[in-house]
Image (cartoon, helix red, strand yellow):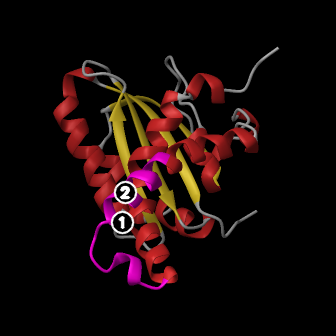
């Protein structure tokens, strides 16, 4: 079943530690290609540590349809072929909406699997909505407060229509929240956000 909601894809890759420069160039090349596809909303990648061979990649598309267009494209297929031998294992997860930010990447070595064959049953449940709301608020409140203090002294700011001030505020704060603040807060609260097991 397809959806028009944004879809976040989280990929954990275990790579060849002797070929880190090649992996770096390969991952960035893939992101650059995805960036040219309609519906691409952003991406990022990090290593678990400076000497780690575990890499985490996160990217987002506007809908299942635009994501499928990228994942089944000849351009992506040819890019994956150039990385043959660089990746030892891989695991892919999908989340719709804001829940994609709350996934905790798995640990340990995971055999390579076919993303098309992955089952949603393998995914752990996302944190409760109230925890997601608290997490977002913990990031948004201080950022919004700092921004307000910074722009209030700006001459003419208070004379602008309220809709224009709100527009400017959201245009500035949304990317800050999406790319830096929210990922930082979710990493900091990962233990609290993780579902409890019995």
In terms of image quadrants, where is residue 83? top left
Q: Magenta span: helix, strand or loop, mainly? A: helix
Residue at the image position 41 percent from the left and 84 percent from the top: 160
The residue singled out by tag 2 in the image is 149
Q: Residue furthest left?
A: 21
Q: Give the extent of the magenta segment.
A: 142-161
Residue lying furthest right? 198
Q: Quadrant of the N terminus?
A: bottom right
Q: Mark 1 sits on what residue?
A: 152
Q: Is residue 77 visible?
A: no
Q: Residues within 10 Å of mark 1 (few under 14, many from 20)?
A: few
How far from the left and from the top, in percent, is residue 187?
49, 31
Residue at x 48% of width, y 39% of height: 11
Q: Secondary structure at mark 2?
A: helix
Tell me if residue 56 comes above or below residue 168 in the rendering: above
On the rendered structure, is 85 left or right of 169? left
2 and 1 marks in contact (CB < 8 Å): yes
Whether residue 125 is in magenta: the answer is no
Query: Which of the pair 54/46 is nearer the observer?
Result: 46
* Whole-number angstrom distance, CA of label 2 to CA of label 1: 6 Å
- Percent from the top left, x then y, of residue 69? 52, 68
Mark count: 2
- Disc 2 packing (10 Å; few <14; some 14–19; many ≥20): few
Figure quadrant of residue 115: top right
Which residue in the rendered view is the most extreme toward the top?
198
What is the quadrant of residue 19 in the picture? top left
């Amino acid at each position: 079943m397809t959806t028009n909601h944004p879809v976040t894809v989280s990929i954990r890759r275990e790579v060849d530690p002797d070929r880190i420069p090649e992996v770096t160039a390969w991952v960035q090349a893939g992101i650059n290609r995805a960036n040219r596809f309609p519906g691409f909303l952003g991406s990022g990648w990090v290593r678990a540590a400076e000497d780690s061979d575990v890499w985490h990649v996160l990217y987002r598309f506007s809908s299942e349809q635009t994501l499928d267009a990228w994942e089944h494209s000849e351009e992506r297929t040819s890019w994956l072929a150039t990385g043959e031998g660089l990746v030892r294992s891989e695991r892919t997860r999908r989340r719709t909406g804001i829940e994609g930010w709350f996934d905790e990447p798995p640990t340990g070595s995971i055999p390579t699997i076919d993303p098309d064959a992955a089952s949603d049953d393998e995914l752990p449940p996302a944190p409760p909505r109230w925890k997601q709301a608290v997490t977002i608020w913990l990031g948004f409140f201080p950022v919004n407060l700092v921004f307000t203090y910074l722009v209030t002294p700006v001459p003419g700011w208070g004379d602008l229509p309220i809709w224009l001030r709100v527009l400017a505020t959201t245009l500035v704060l949304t990317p800050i929240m999406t790319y830096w603040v929210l990922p930082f807060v979710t990493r900091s609260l990962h233990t609290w956000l993780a579902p409890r097991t019995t």
